[in-house]
Amino acid sequence: MVYDVLIIGAGVIGTLIARKLSFYDLNVCILEREADVAVGSSKANSGIVHAGYDAVPGTLKAILNVKGNILFDKVSKELDVPFKRIGSLVIAFTQSDKDKLQMLYQRGLENGVSDLEILNSNAEISHLEPNISSEAIGALYAPSAGITCPYELAVAAVENAVENGVELKLQTQVNDIKHINGLFHIETNRGTVLSKYVVNAAGLYSDNVAQMAGDHAFSIKPRKGEYMLLDKSQGEIVNKVIFQTPTPSGKGILVTPTVDGNLLIGPTALDIDDKEDFSTTAAGMNEVTQGALKSVPAINTRQVITSFAGLRAVPSTGDFIIEYSPSTKRFIHVAGIESPGLTAAPAIAEYVAQLLKGADLDFVNKKDSKSQRKSIVRFSEASDEEKMDLIKSNKLYGNVICRCETVTEAEIVESIRRPAGATNLDAVKRRTRSGMGRCQGGFCTPRIIEILSRELAIPMENTTKNDKDSLLLDRRTKEVE
Amino acid sequence: MREADLVVIGGGPAGMAAAVEAARNGVEKVIILERDHTLGGILPQCIHNGFGLHLFGEELTGPEYADKFIKQVEELNIDVKLNTMVLDITQSRIVTAVNSQDGLIKIKAGAIVLAMGCRERTRGALNIPGTRPSGIYTAGTAQRLVNIEGYMPGKKVVILGSGDIGLIMARRMTLEGAQVKMVCELMPYPGGLNRNIVQCLKDFDIPLRLGHTVVNIHGKARLEGVTIAKVDEKGKAIADTHEFVECDTLLLSVGLIPENEISRDASITIDDVTAGPVVNESAETSVPGIFACGNVVYVHDLVDNVTNNGYIAGRNAARYLKERAGDTVKANANILQVRPGQGVRCVIPQLVHGNCPEDVTLSFRVDGIYRDVMIEAKADNQVIKSVKKRITTPGEMESITLSREMLQSIESGKIEVCLSSLERKGD
Amino acid sequence: MSKNTELTCIVCPLGCKLSVLQGEDDSIIEISGHSCKRGLSYAQTECINPERVITTTVRIRGGQMPLVSVKTDKPIPKTLMMKCMKIINRIEVMVPVKVGDTILENILETGANLVATGNAT
């Protein structure tokens, strides 16, 4: 089988590209080295859909941020993923901050963001957000900013793509790339895959992949961001995304509600060397706490339920790298997708499709392709009547497995059985929210292990948390001599 | 909508005690809603002994203790719905629950007893830095895996927290063939009973590192080790005391938190210190007809006390139903506020009626280890009762009983429970 | 040569620190540090013949759940604990099992029986 397009990387970028291509009569395949989609940068970021005043005008970041922001309503509706346009505030504490806000405002205008507003007093800010620090003296208000769930978006996109015929190969790592007689031979740990075109959406490793194809033009460095997630009881302390005035390292510590009602604070910004270092640190947690309290002193940071770290893929070029490789024909890089990557994602998918359209591939609309995808019906969000109907249609909706988030067995089973379904605990968690509540899986984990074992027909001791080495259990009791 | 005189939420020792006591006191339609596949609450997985010494004069295992009450529930023909999760309760006492057989159930209850127990504090809540590999479990979840499902969570174990659950699991894991390398305890004193230190740690030569905690977690996929460090009096890690301990399993026994989601949804007043509902001597919450007992009110040590607490709730729920005068919280009654004073962390019940017809026992925990102290109940600026104690620790709940005459004579509306040093009379 | 053993009494929360002096033949010469008779008696047993009750689980065949909880109905010598566990781990019991049923008699000739503490159907 020779694919028309092979996408390396099933993060939010790779999956949305795959989905876009799945509307056409093309043989598309996604290779992902981890055991699920969206396990890299797509799993651990702020989940913000930015308004578009940050990026330097004329850059791909700026253009695709604004385009992506506009596309988010449509894409989130089609894919049935949460997206809330709650607006954002960039807070100024000093005159120098205020000057920066003016600069961002101008930049926003240049980038095509026309509904920005400068607030000049604490009173104006408190009117919108009563819990903002009394030391705030100004703010940039962007009504078009919003929040979404990045990994839900990727899961939805890949489900849609797979339903339309795209092949997803998980746990498949690209080891080498050869270009022979106009065809790419991609050598993986599971054999060689052949394709006419390759889209390099390998995130943190897109420079490694580029080098395999003979292209050494750019490098990707990881920049760590640590976050803390707070209990839902803190979820209404602000109603918009609260930024601090940006610095050269990034947008600073933000405070935001999440689409599920929690409060997210972070990230830090630390350049590191190890692309596999996802550890949180005491210093990082401290920086997050101090930063968040500066903007919103009323936060009760002791209400933390979990913390995590994500890595941004920082390109050596300073902007998104979305182009055909200058040294290797038919090889498209979609690299260095750091912030505003999530916002730009729907626009990046269209941009890449356009790049491919201009090549020698036949872009014929695929008959019967679907652009809509429905998420798993959430019992917790159903009305009483709907709950009764759900249980009538599927008894397993009557078994509540995750008490904290009210997730039922039906949803967990469906998350496993769907195309591109979950094969491990974290994957179930990302698709259903089970284990994301206050008890962090204390109650539901043994039950979910049982369900995974049953549905995947594997012994309980073979179930994993995420990749194949993250075994959850050791052995049955009484099996040792 | 279904109807029941009494709906008991939770079929553990607290709920079962409340249900049987209510039934014995004349309540006709009692129903227990239990989310697990058996009654017993946490007891079926607590296969060790030490339960029931006070109530039955014997040392029973958790399942045996539960069995005694399960038999009583059966004999009294109390309705039980297993595998049933309560989703919501309202102030007007409508209970919404769900199971796969009946679907969504709504019950209009004459009275409700909350007995949902507690959950364990998590790694996330402690915010321990490091990676997020598999192999990290709270001690109770590990106990369930070992004793109910029959699986070992790992081979080389470090346990954080020397409360009884952590100590019990140190022994359990060792007996089933794992290597427990150490138990770390943040405080300079152990959290659990001496008996467990001896029988769970000393018996197996498992080191107990007091004044130590886990400061970092290592391992990409599965846990590979933890870094522990000594801590100062404030619980902060001391530099240069970091030590890497190789292990594939970390069990956390770092605190229990009453599970009050449902209570909060019904706007029942919650005590910020206990994290449980504010209750009076009748185990009644701030909402008339809704009672609460057991660990959902305050985390107890002895299940015997949980049972007694359940009896109080059941008895008073029965009385409430008989009277049906609306509010047992009589509006003009002298309500006394019970507060913790020096040396005491929290006290229940938080409210007591001055005209209560019975003696009232106040239960509390101290905030440190004290030797040779006086437990005092103070009101109207004087000590109204005192009890000598040679030793008292946070790990053992204490109590002090006030007679109804004493309660009736209190004028200032407040009772304080505190500690003071014993006066030594020369040596 | 006499030997001195330090123990913490477990009978009540006081946790008295006991000192037991034993002679060459292990006979007890002196016990000190206790505050009551129960502590004295605990010190004696613990030094000469420490015993423990074992509580564990046993595999079930044909039941809804894989295990049932069990205990020894009397304490057994501490030194036999792990050996006892090995024997228990080899057993498989058929359902039904009731609380109190004897699973294994006279385990390791100790006079203690292994009894069920839970029910299994």
Image: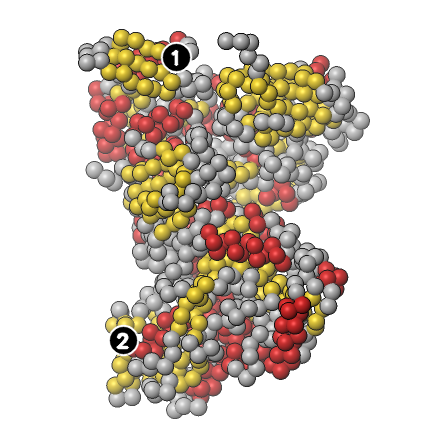
Q: Please tell me in which quadrant of the rendered image residue A141 appears.
A: bottom right
**Residue found at x 62% / y 45%:** B88
Q: Is residue A34 left or right of residue B412?
A: left
**Number of callouts:** 2
Q: Are marks 2 and 1 on the same chain?
A: no
Chain identity of mark 1: C
Determine which of the numbered discs, if any, sits on residue A176 in the image: 2
> Callout 2 environment at 10 Å: few (<14), some (14 to 19), or many (20+)?
some
Percent from the top left, x then y, of residue A474? 30, 46
Q: Chain of mark 2?
A: A
The residue carrying mark 1 is C34
As shown in the figure, which amino acid type bears the numbered disc 2? Asp
Q: Residue at x 59, y 27 (%)?
A: B344
Q: Residue B110 in the image: state x and y as whole percent.
A: 68, 34
Q: Secondary structure at mark 1?
A: loop
Left or right: A200 as drawn, with respect to B315: left
Nearest the eye: B234 or B385: B234
Residue C81 in the figure: left or right of residue A269:
left
Q: Is residue A153 above or below residue B333?
A: below
Res B246 visible? yes
Please, is residue C108 above or below residue B275 in the view? above
In the picture, which quadrant includes the C terminus of chain A? top left
Q: Nearer the viewer, mark 2 or mark 1?
A: 1
Real-space Cα separation, disc 2 to disc 1, in angstroms: 74 Å
Give the residue type that dot 1 points to.
Answer: His
Q: Quadrant of the N terminus of chain A?
A: bottom left
The residue depicted at 38 percent of the width and 39 percent of the height is B159
